[in-house]
Amino acid sequence: MSNSFFAVYKMPDDPAAFDEAYKGHTAIVEKLPGMTELRVNKVVNQVAGEPKLYLITEMAFGSVEDLQAALASDPGKESAADLQSWGGDKLISMLVTERLQ
């Protein structure tokens, strides 16, 4: 079963500065307890839709409870505070779980 937190970032005003800040942010995110996979993907061709997107990060967890615990952990709180200091206005976030049938 898939339980993921997606962080989708809108196009920044200064992509180089964003990339530099995101390197430090990723170092914090990598400390999240219970995370089974981290995928960071740069948008290279947005076919349709607004706003223009820049980066899509997926953090996968074994369960929704693991994900919630990670966000409430010290690294989760540090990640949230760090993001607010440089890129919080560019973030669209969502928790995604496998569709029930």
Image (cartoon, rainbow, N blue to C red):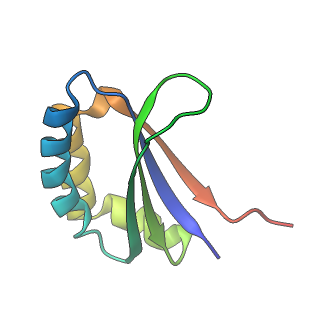
- Lateral position of residue 70 relative to residue 50, left or right: left
- Lateral position of residue 21 relative to residue 80, left or right: left
Quarter holding residue 97: bottom right
Question: Which residue is at the front of the view, 31 or 20?
Answer: 20
User: Which quadrant, please, contains the C terminus?
Assistant: bottom right
- Lateral position of residue 21 relative to residue 73, left or right: left
Quarter holding residue 29: bottom left
User: Which quadrant, please, contains the N terminus?
Assistant: bottom right
Q: Position of residue 84 (x, y in %)?
A: 22, 35
In this view, 52 is above or below 41: above
Question: Which residue is at the front of the view, 10 or 101?
Answer: 10
Q: Position of residue 4 (x, y in %)?
A: 52, 62
- Which residue occupies 12% across, 53% down? 24
- Which residue occupies 47% across, 69% down? 60
Q: Position of residue 76 (x, y in %)?
A: 27, 58
Q: Position of residue 37 (x, y in %)?
A: 41, 73
- Lateral position of residue 59 relative to residue 87, left or right: right
Q: How many marks?
A: 0
- Which residue occupies 44% across, 42% down? 43
In this view, 63 is above or below 4: below
- Which residue occupies 35% across, 66% down? 70
